[in-house]
Amino acid sequence: MTRIIEIYNEKQEQIEFNCENLPLEIYFLNNKEEINELLIEPFYDNKELGDKNVIGYIAEEEEHLFFQPFEENSSNTIFHNDEIIKKSVWLKSGDTLQIKHRIISYSVSGDRISIVISRVAKAPVIISPPQKEINIHEAGNNPEKSTHIENGSYKSDKQKNKKIISFFFVILILLACFVFFC
């Protein structure tokens, strides 16, 4: 089967391979010009790692691609679809690999395989709500529609009154049934 593998690096440059170029090597290049650039290229067994910090390999078995982490790479935690991995995983369309602050997205469309390398966006800052009770009525709202926020729950006075009336109505019906059947 002849499939095309398109790799889009962090600079959005497109590199194209076919399945004959497998396995692909995933590594960080540690040089002075491009600090910690993540690259995916065909693997050449030259045994010299040089300035490479090899993360793993993408290879093919029975026309399916898989990711194999590099055995000596214990310093980098690798996530496959948000789960930590230590051994080979099959790659399916829509899968992601996260290594440090990089995400590798994998998608398949017909005979085209797209692999996109991108940086992880910064997480938004989450602000917690205040823990003390807030009484909006005291803030100058209409007394008929006063609301209270207590222990994280929000209820208006009308909602509280409705529940109390419903409770007494149910008790009245139960008493009527008891008298009727006895």
Image (cartoon, grey):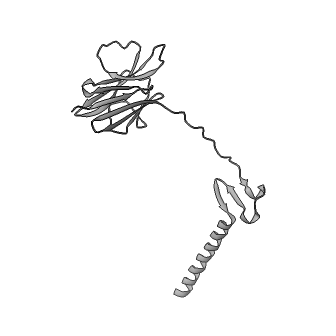
In the rendered view, does 165 fall on the left or right side of 97? right
44 vs 30, left or right, is left
Q: Position of residue 66 (x, y in %)?
A: 30, 32
Residue at x-position 61% and y-position 77%:
169
Task: Please say whether residue 182 is visible from this viewpoint.
Answer: no
Residue 7 figure quarter: top left
Q: Position of residue 123 (x, y in %)?
A: 55, 36
Q: Is residue 144 above or below residue 138?
A: below
Q: Is residue 154 visible?
A: yes
The residue closer to the viewer here, 147 or 85, is 147
* x and y, in percent, of residue 51 in the image: 41, 14
Which residue is the extreme one toward the front? 13
Pick the front one: 106 or 59: 106
Residue 46 is situated, as x and y percent measured from the top left of the image, at 30, 13
Write the residue at 35% across / 33% down: 114
Location of residue 163 by image quarter: bottom right
**What residue is shown at x 29% (from left), y 17% (from top)?**
44
The total number of labels drawn is: 0
* Residue 132 vertical position relative to residue 85 in the rendered view, above or below: below
- Image quarter where the N terminus lies is top left
Q: Where on the picture, by quarter, is residue 14?
A: top left
Q: Is residue 75 left or right of residue 64?
A: right
Q: Residue at x 70, y 58 (%)?
A: 148
